Amino acid sequence: MTLFRQILLMIIVCFSLNLVGVLWLEFNSTRNYLANQLESDLNNTSTSLSMALQPHLQSDDKVMIESTINTYFDGGFYESIELETFVDEKTISRKNPVRIAGVPEWFINLDLLNIPQQETTITDGWMQAGTLKIKGHPGFAYKQLWEAFTAMFIWIFCLSIAVIIFTGFGIRVLLGPLRKIQKKAQEIQERKFGNALELPATKELKQVTEAINKMTEKLKEQFQEEARLHDKLKQQAFQDPTTGLGNRSFFNRQLNAWLEESAHGSVLLLELNGLETIKKRDGFTQRDDVVKAAAQRLLNVFNPDNGHVACRLSVNEFAVLVQGADLQAIEYKLEQLQQTLESPHFTKQFYDEPIFYIGTVVVKEKTEATKLMGMVDSALQQARQSAKHINIVQQNKENTASTLVKTELRDKILGAINNANLGFSRQPVIEFNKPQDTLHFEAFAQLKLKDLGSINAASFISVLDEYELGQVFDKKVIETIFAHINKHPDKSYAINLTASALKDENFILWLIDMIRANSHLAAHICFEFSEESVIYNRERIENLCYQFTNMGIQFGVDRVGRNFSSLSYLQSIHPNYVKIDHAYTQMALSNKDDAYFVGSLCTTIHNLDVAVIATRVENEAQLEILKEYHFDGYQGFIYKPEHFEISQ
């Protein structure tokens, strides 16, 4: 029982006892008054009737005796009048049944009134002539008593209702600060710190509120300090201090993880020429400004929001992992990059020509990182000898999909989506300490394209983003999986949302309506989106996560830790779980020194009461190593994705 109800119940009980006491005192007083009045009236009647009957008894006038008794009986309000004569030992009796209109029978049967009766001896000189017995009728008294009782009861009932309402309102007002404290405590438990509570006027609650505010501030500072420490260590180890991009170590880890995961896209090296000359003539500050400007132009073309990874490898070298970019896409991107690097505002800062060289390899199948970087270096060497200063090399020229014109590929993808030519596979996410328990299955969608067969999302996600088809694709996937769960509600599925779909306000509104229309599936679905989507589309994502929380939908963030942004965004959206970037899994498995960053990342996230899931776990040996980092779950090729039929 809540404190509000306990206090209200205590007040109601005390108030009710007081009212019952007052009601009984008033009722008893009224009852005694009516009984006394009845007894007084009976005494007067007995005396008067005795005197009236005395001469008739002396003359033994039977007619007058009965006439006198009838007159008194009819003119008064008596239950019975009885006269016993001693001369002939006869009894004259008149009775009136106790029935009172407007008074319930059960009330009369309570015998609340002690009905008086009077017995008088009538004399004839010194001789006894007879005995007169009169019993008062309780009708009038009961009627008066019932009316008094009902009036008092109605008044007390109405007063009680008014007191309960007023008291309840007053208690709610007084306990308002306590409810805020309770809500704040729940938010702290969920690691949602928010703003400080307003201090109430009540002294005791004011002290408690001050303590809660201090504790909240302390915990908030503690989390922020841990996040800052993790970010600082990560920046020192993996970030270039001049540009804020990843360094060579970060690039190597991302490259290895990317090659293991999808290996579909492009890798390019950009070499800036003449930085040493700028340093000698204008100083290192000017050189750093030029490097920063080049890095920003690189990010403008290869937006991290789309999953591209840009790094600075050395003083004059930059590298970019371009997700899902085929030959046509990378040619278009390099054309944009060439235009921005050759703009007069940028070139005027250089003294040497040409100012850049770019070597690119289009990757279509998995290979070793050292072999791939050898190809990229070779492409860069050829670019130095090229008139355009740009060279593109294809890893495998016999891939049919790459020969398609981009618009043709787009049309094939759109046709497959509209015709629901989708295939699905799923991979379980396992609870770390309970291998028999599956947290959920992550659903992977493939498109069945004519002449190309089934292709994974990694092969066409760049086309979806470029032509803003993500919301069309996501809608079809969500509708299909929802229909499947409706028929097979024995498993829970995680659905990935594309970055381009999350930028579409209409898609978000559609998704919310879709979930509300299928609210019975809330326990069987969850949604995932990448860390880049949160960082570069934070306002929409925060609003969507707020809706998810209100509807009881679980959601997670994928590839956490891939970017150099602070983890503070986790505090604002508070996901149910995160999947750390698989580069961290490789760090934990390959190098004890780097593994410290994995532990730091997990600790920081756990402090927000968010579950942490390891990715790209491939065997039991890796699982044993990862146990010491206190992951909540894991996912990877230790349980390979399995195809499953969708029932619509």
Image (cartoon, rainbow, N blue to C red):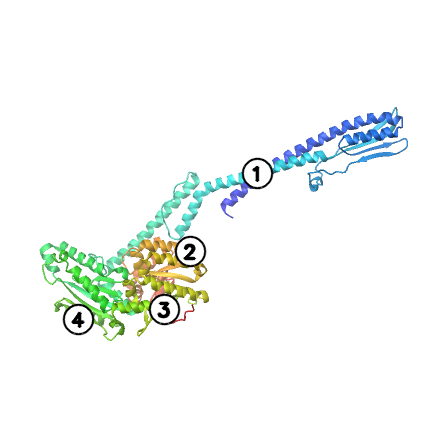
Q: Dividing the picture into quarters, in which one does residue 385 lie?
A: bottom left
Q: Are marks 3 and 1 in contact (CB under 8 Å)?
A: no
Tell me, yes or no, whether the two marked residues, 3 and 4, touch with CB atoms within 8 Å: no
Where residue 9 sits: x, y (%)? 54, 43
Q: Check whether the beta carbons of the residues at disc 2 and disc 3 lie within 8 A of each other.
A: no
Judge by depth and name the residue closer to the eye, 542 or 473: 473
- Residue 36 against residue 613 in the figure, above or below: above
Check disc 3 and report its element: helix, strand or loop: loop
Q: Earlier in the sequence, mark 4 or mark 2?
A: 4
In the drawing, what numbered circle is on residue 419?
3
Residues 73 and 292: in front is 73
Q: Secondary structure at mark 2?
A: loop
Q: Which residue bears the numbered disc 2? A: 551
Q: Position of residue 132 (x, y in %)?
A: 82, 31
Q: Residue 200: x, y in percent?
A: 41, 40
Q: Residue furthest right?
A: 88
Q: Which residue is mark 1?
A: 158
Q: Which residue is mark 4?
A: 378
Residue at point 83%, 35% (across, down): 93
Mark 2 neighbour class, 10 Å CA radius: few under 14, some 14 to 19, many 20 or more: some
Place of residue 370 in the rendered image (x, y in percent of width and height, measured from the top left): 22, 71
Q: Secondary structure at mark 4?
A: helix
Badge 1 element: helix
Q: CA–CA distance between discs 1 and 4?
A: 94 Å
Q: Residues within 10 Å of mark 4 (few under 14, many from 20)?
A: some
* CA distance separating discs 3 and 4: 44 Å
The Cα–Cα distance between marks 2 and 1, rounded to whole angstroms, is: 42 Å
